[in-house]
Structure formats: C-alpha cells, structure tokens
Image: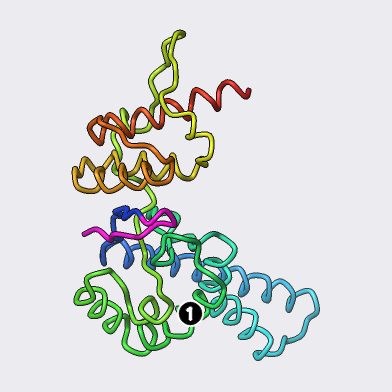
Amino acid sequence: MSLQIETAQNVGVDYEIASVGERILAQFVDYAVYFVWIMAVVAITSVSDSAKSGISSPWITTGAMMLPIMLYPLLCEYFMDGQTVGKMALKIKVIRLDGSKATLSSYLLRWLLSIVDVSLFSGLVAIFAIVINGKGQRLGDIAAGTAVIKTHPTIRLEHIMTPDLDPNYRPAYPGVVRLSDKDIRTIRKVLATNNEELMETTMHKMEDLLGINSLETASVFLWTIINDYNFYASSEV
C-alpha cells in the first residue's frame, strides 16, 4: 500500500505505508525496551536497598519504572525524527501528510490518543482504523495529520547513482542553479516510480519553474535537469 504525498513543489510522491505487521513488530521491540528498563530499575533499587539496609518507597520505584515508559513514545518520536527504537529497528517512521517532519503538537496528539488506540483496547482500535483508513493511519495519526511510512526506499540502483558526466558535457538549462538539493531528490523519487503521468506532471512543473518549454520526453528531460544540476554543483567545488 502506498501513500501519495504532495510536496512543496506541488508534486505527488508515493511513499510506501508501513504495514500493520511492521507496526505491531515495532511495538513489540518497544515492549522489550520497557522490559529492560523495568529490570534495570528493579536491579538498581535492590542494590540501593541492600546498601542502605532499608526499604525504598514503592511510590518512588513505581514512578521510576512507569514515568519513562509513559513518556518514551512521545520523547523518542520527537527527538529521533519520528522513530522509537522499535520503529528504527523495523525501518519505519512518522511523517506529516505533506511529507514534512511532524511537529511536537502532532507527536503529542498521537501520544495522547494512543490511550484509546492502543492501551484501552489492546491495539484493536488502532488495527481496525489502520485497515479501513486507506492511509495506514490510526486515530492518533488521523487527528495529528500524520502517517507511518517505510524509511527504506524501493529505488533501484540506477535511480540513486548519477552517471559520470562526459568531460565535454554542456548543460542545457542554466536555470537549474535555482533548484535545491531537495528539488533534485524529489525528481529522483519521481523517476524511481516509473509513473509516466507523474513524470509528465513533474516535467511541466519544472518547465514552469525554469521558464522553458522542452520537446524532450519527460524522463529524458528530468535526467537532463539532474545532470545539469550536478554539472553546476561540481563546478562550484
């Protein structure tokens, strides 16, 4: 299942949505992190009690166990760019529906609604929402305007490697110097889809942006844009 996200260049780019299975496995990895933390707190508390020959407050011990676990999803996703340890292990992450990095308020909404999505009903509400939503969103994602996608792109080697330019190469479109690295990455993702309609749309967007009218096919035009950009970028080094 894929999710088409509208980039800042008004070009739709397909992202592969994380499956329910991947999200469940990521949650189990996070549960393992919780278990290790609880064992660590128990061990530290036991050593501390033995050293003091006393009994520590059960409230302090419980708080030391539960508070970090409660805040773990929120803090991890905020400081680790949309990932917990489990999501990182499964190579999935949270992003906004416009393709940008989620904000603190988005993470906060997801975290608060996880009480309904995951905790109260053992994840059944989350699974049901993800399956019927069509965008792989649980209730927290819908409220926050986020989705969970796969971070490893399904891009072939020829789409990520730029062939060496001929020493006599001459750029066709000097206006590409106005583009950014992010624009070029977007073009590469579009080429990786092999979607003719998407490539045509992207070509027209680039033509409007650069003020040109090309007679080339969409794929040839977009590769020319990439090569011209790399030519000028290498000339600046």
The residue tagged with tag 1: helix, strand or loop?
helix
Spot the residue most to the right: 52
Q: Residue at 49% across / 29% down in the picture?
A: 174
Q: Is residue 13 above or below residue 31?
A: above
Q: Find disc 1 in the rendering and name its residue.
A: 111
- Which residues lie in the magenta part? 1-10
Image coordinates of residue 26 in percent, x first then y, are 38, 63
Q: Residue at 72% across / 86% down in the picture?
A: 56
Q: Visible in this render: residue 33?
A: yes
Lateral position of residue 157 relative to residue 71, left or right: left
Spot the residue most to the top: 168
Q: Is residue 134 magenta?
A: no
Q: Residue at 28% across / 61% down in the picture?
A: 3
Q: Is residue 64 above or below residue 228?
A: below
Look at label 1 and name its amino acid.
Trp
Image coordinates of residue 48 in percent, x first then y, are 74, 75
Which quarter shows the C terminus?
Answer: top right
